Image: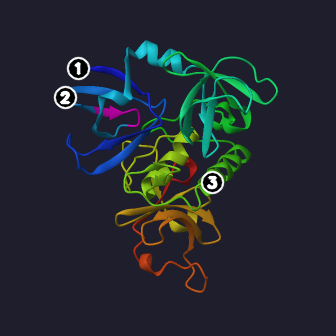
Amino acid sequence: MKGMVMVNVPVLPVYRHPESGSERVDELLYGMWGQLFGETCGEYVHLCTGYGYEGWCRRDGLKYGEWDICRAWCSSRAFIHSRFADIHQMPRISSPIILTLPKGSLITVCEEEQDGWQQVELLDRRIGYVRSCGLGPVCAGKRDCYWQNNGIMLPEKEEAALRESLVRTAKMYLGTPYRWGGKSPEGIDCSGLCSLVYWIHGIVIFRDSRICPEYAVRKISMSQMAPGDLLYFPGHMAMYIGDQQYIHSSNTCGGVVISSMDPQSENYFPLLEGKLIAAGSVFLHQEA
């Protein structure tokens, strides 16, 4: 079994091995896509996600189709921008709920917004309605997605706006519980937080807590760090938000928190003292 697939459930766990009780290494959200390798094991299929991460997931959470079909479905897509968004049968708050989707899910928009509601189409072709305030554009500034090892070169004002948006989006996850392999408001891990925030802005970075040369992040010096850049520690990563502070999902802290690199700060996180391996950025003019 090979071909393109799209996620047809709100959250689809991705496992290291095709068996019950295996380690959860990632989560795919509704509307994300991948490609099957052809291997199957019972109810599990082996796939590569749209951002190049491999694992096993249950086949009943996937919709199968050719690349042209997947691309056509994505042509008018939008991200779920609120923490969760209800898809209603009709454009009114009292209407029955068809599906509830987490932040970061992809959905196809059909018609112009009307009275604060947006008509959307689900993967099973059902039509529903979502509050317009819960949606956001796929790429900030209506740019094309930045994939794999393509870095970003933007005018100063546009770069500043993108950095601000990255930090603002990350802060929306404050208080989210820590979940190993998680990537939704129900629970998220350190690399899940950083990679999903970038994904929401149309930028693909590696899912794990290291700089991978096939992706957009490049090592920079500490003096070059600016809000939205990334910090890498042994088995951990975070997003720098300025003023020696960073946001991260920490198992020790129980979830997403803001910590400081300043030992005099009340939110200083001593467990990471002296353990910073590298700082990274997707912005090309910063490359060391």
> Looking at the picture, which amino acid does disc 3 mark?
Met
Give the camera-side residue of 128 and 254. Answer: 128
Q: Which mark identifies residue 40? A: 2
Q: Is residue 80 left or right of residue 237?
A: right
Query: In the rendered image, which quarter contains the N terminus?
Result: top left
Compare marks 2 and 3 and give the one earlier in the sequence: 2
- Up-down relation of residue 280 to residue 156 (above or below): below
**Where residue 257 sits: x, y (%)?**
56, 66
Q: Residues within 10 Å of mark 3 (few under 14, many from 20)?
A: some
Marks 2 and 3, Cα distance to the nearest angstrom?
Answer: 37 Å
Disc 2 is placed on an element classified as strand
3 and 1 marks in contact (CB < 8 Å) = no
Q: Is residue 46 magenta?
A: no
Q: Which residues are magenta?
A: 47-51
Q: Choose top left, top right, bottom left or bottom right for residue 9.
A: top left
Query: Which colour style is shown?
Result: rainbow
Disc 1 is placed on an element classified as loop
The secondary structure making up most of the magenta span is strand
* Residue 163 shows up from this direction: yes
Q: Which mark identifies residue 1? A: 1
**Where residue 56 sits: x, y (%)?**
27, 38
> Looking at the picture, which amino acid does disc 1 mark?
Met
Q: Which mark identifies residue 172? A: 3
- Up-down relation of residue 64 to residue 143 (above or below): above
